[in-house]
Image (tube, grey):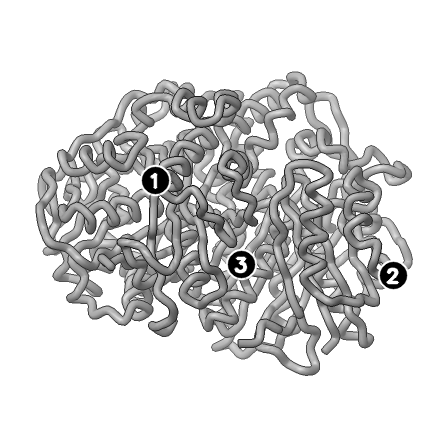
Amino acid sequence: MKSGGLPTAISGFGCACSLGFQVREVAQSLRSGSAHVVPVDLFSVDGCQAQTAAQFPDSPAELAAWIHPAAKRWSRAAQSVLVVLAEALQNHTNFQPDVVIVGTTSGGMDLGETFYRRAIAGGNLESASRRVRSYLPQTPVLDALRVFGIRAPVRVISNACASGTNALGMAWHLVRSGQANRVIAGGYDTLAQLVYAGFDCLKASTPELCRPFDAGRSGLVLGEGAAFFLIEREGPIKIAGYGSATDTHHLTQPHPSGSGPATAMRRALEAANCEPDAVDYINAHGTGTPQNDACEAAAIQSVCPEAAVSSTKAMTGHTLGAAGAIEAAFCAISIQQQFLPPTLNFRSPDLGVSLDFVVNASRETKSRKVLSNSFGFGGANASILFESA
Amino acid sequence: MSNTVSILGAGWVTPHGRSLPEVWKKILHGELPRCETLTLAGKAWPCYRVDPSSLPETNAVPRLRRSGHISHLALGAAINAVEAANLTEEQKSQLAILFATSDGGVTYTHRFFAELGVRGPAAGSPLLFPETVYNAAASHIAAYFHSDREATAMVGDAAVALSAIATGREMLSSGLAEHVLIVAANECDAISAAGYSRWNFLCQSQDDPVGNIFSEGAAAIVLGPHQRKKPAILWCEEGRPYFSQHEASDSLQEILTRHKISPSLVFPSCRRTPMHNLEEEATNQLDGERIDLKKSLGEGLAFTAMAQIVAASHHAETSPQTALVTVLGFASGSAAAYVSSR
């Protein structure tokens, strides 16, 4: 991907996760280094190795219903999308996008599971199927957009945990190439039993604390959230470059060399015409699983060894299809408020890794260029570079 | 910057088989595939499934030994499309891949969730779960062609297939890729049939005048720079989402009025469904013989939408024609594309 093209920037954004439902709240928690990881109370996790998740601090239902009363009956996913879009659009009420691009892995699965349970138990499918529409990944977004009078085509990207970054990357391509003037892009995912049980059975989830890049890390903690961005020509945060790569080594395991993530990072820097040593900070994918973090550390070491690095997943949990978008919001906050969020629960680094990790407390700094990494099942690797305009 | 791109190769895996000309002949002759039955919770739904002999030989691809059915369907169509495109090994290794689906790996998802239902949340299968992610097929296709470019899964109702084509055209226009492989696939499972039965677009028997038989399959195209001797996609657009019947017709019509078209063939998507009149309303000013694929291929959502494109492309390659493909999805998606022999 060659550098150049039209300027592309973020003019507004909203973000909700376990740290709060508004950017202001989220930024405060990032700066103070607080986490909200709690015992799961949304569904049964009986017998699972892990028992915790980074849930929203409260149900999003009340906030959503305040914006649009009918949203009280929506899926948790749709409610969170509505809340976040309301924040993103609050100072941009006339923003009409050419297209909306959204990353997610499980859509409105929290309601879809109701139908699955009923069907598998031989229950009344006729009434249960009313809720099937909510399971479709485009539905939460369509329902929320409709509240704001936005009727643009919606594209749903589902590239596992890279989805949110892929969505932003696609939006960047469209605006910089002049094929779109305005795009809403982002990602969402809420906790669902199927996904929770899936990561648990893979032994990717940890029964203890999530400790990204720590020598004694034992796995990830799942989370939930959403973030959406208004992308156009001008705005306070520039999207400077995006790169992606597919690692075909294995469906769920990255190649140990870190070649996939490294290629994505290099392509993002190339697209931005940015030298690796100009990157001030990397918001790492950093899930806290032994293999992923080792692979990512190797990639960062080979591409941007001088950059400060942290993973915010010990605070927010791994929000899967929303992670790329949420962490892009963290990058924007980091640039606007000039601090780097920390990797919590860190004790000691892996032998042989000598990166500048920001650990256990945020760091005040002047950062201008910030890279966000997202990697997922299927060998989906994506990196996106932001800089102050 | 020209937005005209060519379909360099096309392929499909259908309940009628995998050969493009032979399946096309069966469609034109109105032949029906063998009908099977899906059952769940005391209910039954007829379906058209793909004969396993139509699937690619995957013994040589270790990753595919445990992969879900949808990945086999998708890879079969992808292999045919890439072969027809006559790409070099280097071009294959730089293919961008877009995989469009409506239900993804729903068979494995159903099995995985059923195990949780019976044995509790700690009983998930680590073999099944990774294959339930929507992008599993995209990843397997990338691995097969040794491509390290972006392999992206897109999800939606039937219109997602045309969204993927629109995305592919944008990738080519912005220089992001030299060639884009676009595959759309869907697999049959009783749980999807149970869910979709509410939308009244599935029928209960081959003789039923209303609705289509639920079906599975995959269809694929390779898009590349315009070549004079290959069918071209002159335009492909997504419509505004609709929330009522009235809006559905308007959404499609808005796309069509933006272009001057005079198709010799029209491939509609909603014959025998409650959406038929709305689709007709949007296209009734246009001449052109209507070709209904779903009578022969069934309702395979994203798969059948892409099959409309493959059929239009095949027809355009064999005779000088222009074909309009229209899609009204069941969940607010609308799209249309214009395929020409030039």
Tell me which amino acid carries mark 2: Glu
**Position of residue A228 in the picture relative to residue A259 (left or right):** right
State the residue at coordinates (24%, 49%): A331
Coordinates of residue A376 in the picture (x, y in percent): 38, 49
Q: Do discs 2 and 3 belong to a common subunit?
A: yes
Q: Measured along the vertical axis of the image, is residue B217 above or below residue B128?
A: below
Residue placed furthest toward the bottom: B228
Give the label, 2 or 1, closer to the camera. Answer: 1
Query: Pointer 3: what residue?
Result: B98
Q: Could you tell me which secondary element the residue under label 2 belongs to?
A: strand
State the residue at coordinates (40%, 59%): A172
| Residue closest to the eye, B260 or B113 | B260
Whether residue B176 appears in this view of the structure is yes
Q: Residues within 10 Å of mark 3 (few under 14, many from 20)?
A: many
Decide: marks 2, 1 in contact (CB < 8 A)?
no
Give the label, 2 or 3, closer to the camera. Answer: 2
| Residue closest to the eye, B335 or B298 | B335
Which of the chains bears the disc numbered 2? B
Query: Pointer 1: what residue?
Result: A14
Query: Pointer 2: what residue?
Result: B289
Which of the chains bears the disc numbered 3? B
Tell me which amino acid carries mark 1: Gly
